[in-house]
Image (tube, grey):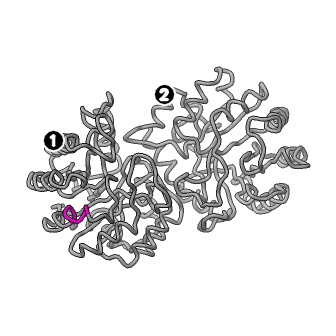
Amino acid sequence: MEDRGAALPAEPVDHNALVGPYPFRRLPDPTPERLVAEMARVGIARARVGHVPSIFYRDVAAGNDELLAWLAPHRPRLVPVPAVNPAYPGWERELERARGEGCPAVRTYPAHYGFDPAGAQMRALAARCAELDLELVLTVRLEDGRQRHRLDTAAELLGADVRATIRAHPAVRVLVTNADRALVEETHFGATPGEAARLHWDVAWLWGPPDDQLAALRRTVGADRFVLGTHFPFRLPEAALARLALAE
Amino acid sequence: MTPAPRPLVDVHAHFLHERCGRSDWADRNLSRLAAGARIGITVHVASILGSWGHTSPVYFPSPADVTAGNEAMRALARAHPGLVRGYVTVNPNYTDHALGEIERGLAAGMVGVKLAASRRASDALLDPVAALAAAHGAPLLQHIWQRRTREVPNQEISDALDLAALAARHPDGRFLLAHIGGGGDWAHSLRALQDVPNVWVDLSGSGVDRGMLELCLECVGAERLVWGTDLTMDTGWAKLRALEAMGLADAALEDIRWKTAARLFRLSL
């Protein structure tokens, strides 16, 4: 059963998990084994998993090699979500490889890879994802902007970037992770109903009571637009689950 | 007979009021109380920061707005006896007014003093406020930006080093560093407070970084941690659940949940 839409489905799927170390602060035990243990502890059945080092590697194909190898012993509980850099040679092959590996989605990081998030390379990537029926995962931010390392200067994703991506191909499906309420609202209501129907959001950066952002968005944007996302290994997995419980 | 609920004190709560310019103010207050009941909060220790920006800035509230906010805070405490307790909010730039608010508020049953970001915590202007709070045995909660690397609009931000300087000048005072998860480099704050025995760390804030709770325990220990929510009760609940899963001794967990707060605020629980 697809988990999307339910506040807390019977078999929750984490759509925003990653593994691997991060250059700007220590992430405790960011391994697949620890992810599996944390999932068991908090009651998450499966996870779609990206690779933190691939955000920083020039050649993300090497990062995808690592991700696929790391997750191999844990499939199908952990499903890889490889990274794709459309500004680097061989990106189409990485998409084909993702498809061949049975991956449901791929991730890209325009600010880190140095391409225009609303430009031709993003449009080409979005179109090819649509043709291969791969969801395209975008990340607004990795950390709270107030705590970022002085060398961590990648721009946060804008609503305009998401709108451009969703308009790049009539069949592209996009999941945006770590978006705040304002970005969700400006993008959702800045898209046609058809475009908005191809957009999903995770709940990692939408707050609960007393402002009740998630509960409000479930009413205004639609409960079926939101998926569970923990942002492991950066954040405590309890947070996303707590806000879903409080939004019921 | 239903057993008494296990105490849980939120040391960093806020409420709105009818003069804050938000039509949903009552709904937000109800939401906090409802979520608190769901989480198991038995005492909300809360403040109101003036008019919340409606008629003077949130972090630089005018004396008139400070007084109105404190009166609204006392009204909420009266409406929810035992469940809601209040901090006296002050703007230390108006020294006489601030001292008067503290005397009035504590006499009326408020249990602590709240400093927003109206003046750097290390500034000498805070000395009479800190001294009066200490004389009354009232803890002082200082709004903190975890590591001050620059100035930001609409706040005169302080970090843990600034608060440590104030705490060193008032060794009899008891200070709470606000929302370790409230934005900024939390590791910087925790390293700075490791040897500052009269500053406690409030766990509230939207930040739920993995590794933060472990470093809290390493640097200041369970005995100087107090639980709270601030503006995001979901993240407060998450940190509470994570603490419960960390294998702490029952006594340490009880200290963080309520015992230390009860001692600091002299709550009968």
Q: Chain of mark 2?
A: A
* Residue B127 included in the magenta stretch of the image: yes
Residue A72 image point, x, y percent = 78, 59
In percent of width and height, residue B223 lies at 33, 73
Q: Nearer the viewer, residue B57 or A89?
A: B57
Instruction: Read off the magenta span.
Output: B125-130
Please identify the residue farthest to the bottom as the structure is shown.
B195
What main secondary structure does the magenta stretch of the protein show?
A: helix
Residue A200: image quadrant is top right
Residue visible at 48% across and 70% down in the picture: B214
Asked if B23 appears above or below B189 in the picture, the reply is: above
Residue hosting label 2: A219
Q: Amino acid at mark 2?
A: Arg
Residue visible at 84% across and 59% down? A62
Badge 1 element: helix
Q: Which residue is mark 1?
A: B75
Q: Residues within 10 Å of mark 2 (few under 14, many from 20)?
A: few
Classify residue A23 by image quadrant: bottom right
Q: CA distance from mark 1 to mark 2?
A: 32 Å
Q: Would you say the residues marked 1 and 2 are in contact, meaning their CB atoms lie under 8 Å apart?
A: no
Residue B96 relative to residue A108: left or right: left
**Percent position (x, y) of residue B54?**
31, 34
